[in-house]
Image (spheres, grey):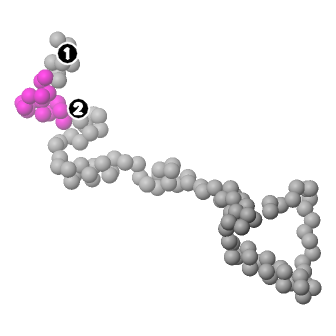
Amino acid sequence: MSKYARYADLVKQTTEYSRRMTRLSNRIFGEVARPTNAKSMKVVKLFSEEPVNQRKEIHAYYPRHIETGKLMMLLRHYGLYRDEHADFKEEMDRMRMLRGKAKPERKYKSEKKPFP
């Protein structure tokens, strides 16, 4: 019989020595030293977790704004999405053009045209 098997059998007994060894083992491995009820274990679990403000998925979350914006512009171009603010701006530009007070066309440095 191995030494570990003897130790495991010894710990299962209800002697004072086995209880103290179990507590020591639990303290070494970061577990709850003494037996506790379910309500206290909930608190222990809560405090053993990493704080919310230090979790990478919480503080480093960055939504994909550029891709989402391009997708919405494309859907608007296809007529599947209505952007009331963009519609309003286009209507204001159209009315300004009819009054003869249109802004000059902006020239882009590269030949690439802006997204539709």
- The residue pinned by badge 2 equals 25
Looking at this view, name the residue that lies furthest to the top: 1
User: Which quadrant of the view contains residue 79?
Assistant: bottom right
Q: Residue at x 92, y 56 (%)?
A: 111
Q: Residue at x 80, y 62 (%)?
A: 116
The front one of 66 and 13 is 66
Q: Is residue 48 above or below residue 93?
A: above
Q: Is residue 113 above or below residue 89?
A: above
Residue 44 falls inside the magenta stretch: no
Q: Is residue 96 above or below residue 74?
A: below
* Residue 46 in view, yes or no: yes
Q: Mark 1 to mark 2: distance in Å?
A: 16 Å
Label 2 crowd (10 A; few <14 / some 14-19 / many >=20): some
- Give the magenta part as a residue range: 9-24
Residue 21 falls inside the magenta stretch: yes
Give the mark count: 2
Q: Amino acid at mark 2?
A: Ser
Q: Residue at x 25, y 37 (%)?
A: 27
Label 1 crowd (10 A; few <14 / some 14-19 / many >=20): few
Say the numbered circle drawn on residue 3. 1
Where residue 48 sits in the image (x, y, percent)? 34, 47
Dot 2 falls on a residue whose secondary structure is: helix
Q: Is residue 90 left or right of residue 10?
A: right
Q: Amino acid at mark 1?
A: Lys
Image quadrant occupied by the N terminus: top left
- Chief secondary structure of the magenta span? helix
Dot 1 falls on a residue whose secondary structure is: helix
